Each structure stands twice: as structure tokens, then as C-alpha cells.
Image (cartoon, rainbow, N blue to C red):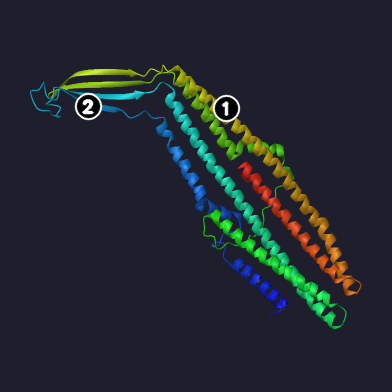
Amino acid sequence: MTPRLRVFLLAASLAVTAAAMAQTPAETVPGGTLDSLFALARERNPEFSAMRHEAQAANERVLPAGALMDPRLKVELQDITKGGEQGATVLPSDVGATAYTLTQDLPWSGKRALKRDIATLEADGAQGRARQTWSELAARIKAVFAQRYLIQGSQRLVGESLDLMLQLEKVLQVRYATGLSAQQDITRIHVEHTAMRGELVALANEWRQTQSRLNLLLGRPADAALAVPQGLRAVPAPSQLEFAALSDRLRSANPQLFVESARVRSAEKSRDLAYKSRYPDFTLGVSAMQRQNAVKEWGLMLEVNLPIRDSALQSQERESEAMLAAARARQEAAANQALAELADNLSALEAARQTEHLAVYSLLPQTDLTWRAALAGYENGKGDFAALLDAQRQIRQAKLNQLKAQVDAQMRLADIERLLGEDL
């Protein structure tokens, strides 16, 4: 099989595969749009599902945290042998006396409310962690989706170059037969064919890798079918990407900052509860005394614990203060980190936008002129075939730079939305 035939068969195979994927109904094969991927990830991603269940479990702990402890009933059989007059028995009517005591623990005023508030804030933190998990998952899906778009575009550019090389080879064969081209020109174009086939092999491997990574995020088998990306999202206008406005949105909506804020408030409540430990808790009880078959004696009971271990209480209070200080420090560190990442991504997004603008309005026109000049010179016998190949590579590289800039902007946009916890 000749090199040209192998190239033709490889290009045809890629075209058939792309056509088959394009004809597959979007309803059965996700991946054409981000919305289809998000819907599947919300339903099937195991990590996000686990976080949602943990948030639900934390929410269910709120009610028990503020509830009273269950009452206790004590039954005490006294003089079960009636002074030795009978054998031991456990029947209340046959013993000397039976005491029934019902008790209820009552914490100091405000302790139950503080425990309920702590549980509520912990539930809020669990909800925030679920939001954070989804925000990170969505950003990863957006990144892989953009990578697949880049690979698809790169395959298209290589395919276009292959078609052009096949056409040039035909021209070269004619010119070589008439003595207008050298054998080394045909060798050069065969080398170019080989290099492009290597690029296609590498791109096909990257395509399979992104397929397995995306399916992992969707909770599907690694080889499950995915549609070809239909297009990239529009990048917001520069007026929507001002750092001052986005930093305010970040402080109010960032999932991690929400979690850290809930931890700070929970630590504050835990500190208040630690100081409440200096106040006693109570136990109230009512008792009844049964003799034979009648209950004729009643009693009331009040029990108070005595928090007199001052050193232990002070240690608990210092611990709660230290935990609160640590929570506040973590909140500040998270805010600083998020704002720094926001600034970095905004700068990189603007750079990608400018790079694309240069590629479209400067680099592509220049490379096109270079190609036309090289082609005209070669056709007139005044140019070198190597210069023609180099001009063609420059055009493909310029188009690839434009595509990479578009994808880089999408990656930065995904990171910005991850930090904000919402789409722009």
C-alpha cells in the first residue's frame, strides 16, 4: 500500500466516524452540549450523590440536637423476701414495697437552642460542601468538553492539510514527469504525510482519553459513546468581567467561603455553649410507692449537677476560643486564595481573548498572504517547494493558535465560574 493510499484511507476513516457520530440522535448520546452532560452528572456522578446524601443526613440531625433527652423510668423492688418470711419474688404485689420513679433531664436555659443552632450550621456547611462539589465537578466537565472541542478542531485542521497535501502531490507528480520538480520535493511531501499521520494517531489517543475522563465524571463506563461537541459557549463581554464586581459576587456566593462562614458561626455557638457549661443541669423526678396492690405514697425529686471543676471548665473554654480563632483564620485564608485565583483567571482570560484577536485579524491574513505568494512563486518556477510547505504549516499553526486561544478562554471561564459558584 502506497503512503498516499494509507493517508487517504485514514482520512476517510476519520470522516466516516465523524459523520456517524453527527448522525447519532442527541437524545441517546450525550456530549454534544454542556447541558446534556450536566443533567447526566447531576443524576449519576457518585461523588456528588454522596455529598447530597451527607447533606441530607446532616439536616436530619438538627431536630434531635435540640430535643430533650428521653425520660427514664426506674422500678425498684424492696424487701423481696419480706424479712425472710417468704422466698424471693419479683412480683410487685408480693414484695415489701415497689418504688416507681420517672425522671427527666432538663439542661440549663439556652443550651438546647445552642445545640440546635450548631447542628443547623453544620447542616448548612454540608449543603455548602455539596454545592462546592458540584461547582468543581461542573468546572471539570467544562474543561474536558473544551479539550474535546480542541481535539476535534485539530483533527479537522490536519484533515484539511492532508487534503491539500494530496492535491499538491498530484501537481508534483505532473511537474516531476515534465522535469519541473525535483525528486526531493516528492520526498518532502511524503515526510509531511507521515508527520500528519503521526499527529492523527496522537489526536485519536487524546480523544479516547478525554472520552474516558468525561465518562468517569458522568458515572458511566469508560467506553460509553459520547457525541461530538457542537460548539463552545460565548465568552462574556469584558464589562462583565470586572474584578471589583466579581470579587463581591465571589464573597457572597463562593461555596467554599460559605462552608468556612458556617464553620465560623458554628465555632461561635460552640464557644457560647462551652461558657454555658458553668451553669448546672437539672433532673426532675416523680415517684410512687406501691405496697401490696395499692399506691399510697408519692414523692418529688430534684437533682442538680455541680460544675465545680473550674480548671477543666476553663480548659474547655480556651479550646473553644482557639477553635473559633482557627475557623476565622481558615475563612480569611480561603477568601484570599479565591480572590487571587479570580485575578489570575481574569488576566489569563483577557490574554486568551487578545491572542485570538491577533490570530484572526493579524496572523491569519499574514500567513494567507505568505501562502499565496509562495504558491504563485512556485507555480512560476521562481519559488522553492520547501517555502511552500512552510507557508502551509504557518497557516495551520495560526488556525490552531486561534482554536487554542478559544479553548483556553473557556478553561479560564470555567475556573471563574467555579470560584463564583454560578455561571456568568
Picture residue at 49% right of the left edge, 35% below the top? 122
Question: Which x, y percent locates residue 16?
Answer: 63, 71
**Dot 2 crowding, Cα within 10 Å, few <14, some 14–19, many 20+:** some
Q: How many marks?
A: 2
**Kind of residue sitting beneath label 2:** Val
* In the image, residue 118 above or below residue 291: below
Q: Which residue is mark 1?
A: 325
Closer to the eye: label 1 or 2: 1
- Residue furthest to the right in view is 382
Q: Which residue is mark 2?
A: 75
Q: Quadrant of residue 283?
A: top left
Q: Earlier in the sequence, mark 1 or mark 2?
A: 2
Query: Tag 2, which secondary structure?
Result: strand
* In the image, residue 182 above or below residue 329: below
**Kind of residue sitting beneath label 1:** Ala
Q: CA distance from mark 1 to mark 2?
A: 48 Å
Question: Which x, y percent locates residue 289?
Answer: 19, 21
Q: Out of 121 and 327, give the one closest to the viewer.
A: 327
Picture residue at 66% right of the left edge, 70% below the top? 15
Q: Quadrant of residue 168?
A: bottom right
Determine whether label 1 and label 2 are within 8 Å by CB.
Answer: no
